[in-house]
Image (tube, helix red, strand yellow):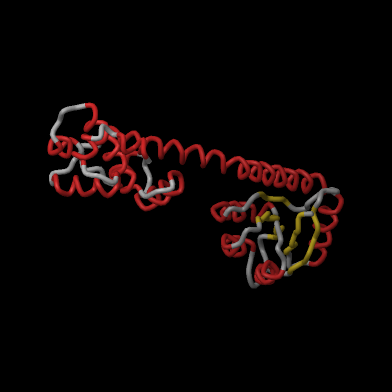
Amino acid sequence: MYKVILVDDERWVRVVLRKAVEQTKLPFEIVQECANGLEAIDALQKHSADLVISDVKMPIMDGIALAEQMTQVSANLILVSGYDDFQLAQKAIRYGVKDYLLKPVEMEAMADCLGRWMQDRITKSARRLEEPPLIETDALSAIEQVQQFISSNLSKDISLTDAAALVHLNPSYLSQLFKQQTGGKFVDYVIEMRMEEAKKLLIKTSLRVSEIAERLGYGDISYFSSTFKKLIGCSPLEYRKCGGRLDEAK
């Protein structure tokens, strides 16, 4: 059952609204009636209501002010108005008012209004259920693009900022996403890919270690060699001499 709060300063109007809601036979339950918007705000703090049906013109706090206050809560608002204040009610659209009902409110109009609200709610719930796989797909696509970017630019200064710009993400968010999807940090992945490429060049080419280091963006051969040894377990020259058999022994 969807929980509803009725708001109108005239008791007889609230009686009419209650009957109209009940006669629709739709799954809506009136949990409280209020005489003005301020009472409705208090009621929303007590009840986890889904919907508020409120008159526009009321003392203390009218329906427009209530609409503004309700932008801070999850419940939706439907306004009830007469022909003379319908234009005023339309102004509340910027506060997210879901629908309008014109006085006198009859059961058919109430049923149509509540039915549309229910359908919108169901549609949004279905979309939320579909979002996680879509988000996951988009995340994987972004990471794959970043990995391809790294592979194609190993000789350059590869920064997280450049990679984030490529996939239109915030660098901090990309850093978290990259670790989530790959299990490691962006900077560590760049180093690992460079060392993998260095291993290939050491075995398949006769390039000097200094030339390989330069190809992979290292201006300092000592730093390149120490990084290689730290990750691979031996120096570049030792790796070349054993023909890469250290990888087989691992």
Can the viewer see residue 66?
Answer: yes
| 98 and 182: which is toward the camera | 182
The answer to whether 163 is drawn above or below residue 76 in the figure is above
Q: Position of residue 39 (x, y in %)?
A: 69, 71
All told, the count of numbered labels is 0
Q: Can the viewer see residue 153 in this picture?
A: no
| Residue drawn at (58%, 53%) of the image | 96
Q: Position of residue 116 (x, y in %)?
A: 71, 43
103 vs 57, left or right, is right
Nearest the viewer among 33 and 167 is 167
Taking the image as shown, residue 219 lies to the left or right of residue 169, namely left
Residue 77, above or below 135: below
Taking 100 as reference, is 69 above or below it? below
Residue 180 screen position, x and y as percent: 46, 48
The quadrant of the rendering that contains the C terminus is top left
The residue positioned 21% from the left and 35% from the top of the image is 241
Which residue is at the front of the view, 111 or 178? 178
Q: Position of residue 204 (x, y in %)?
A: 23, 27
Is 205 situated left or right of 44 in this image?
left
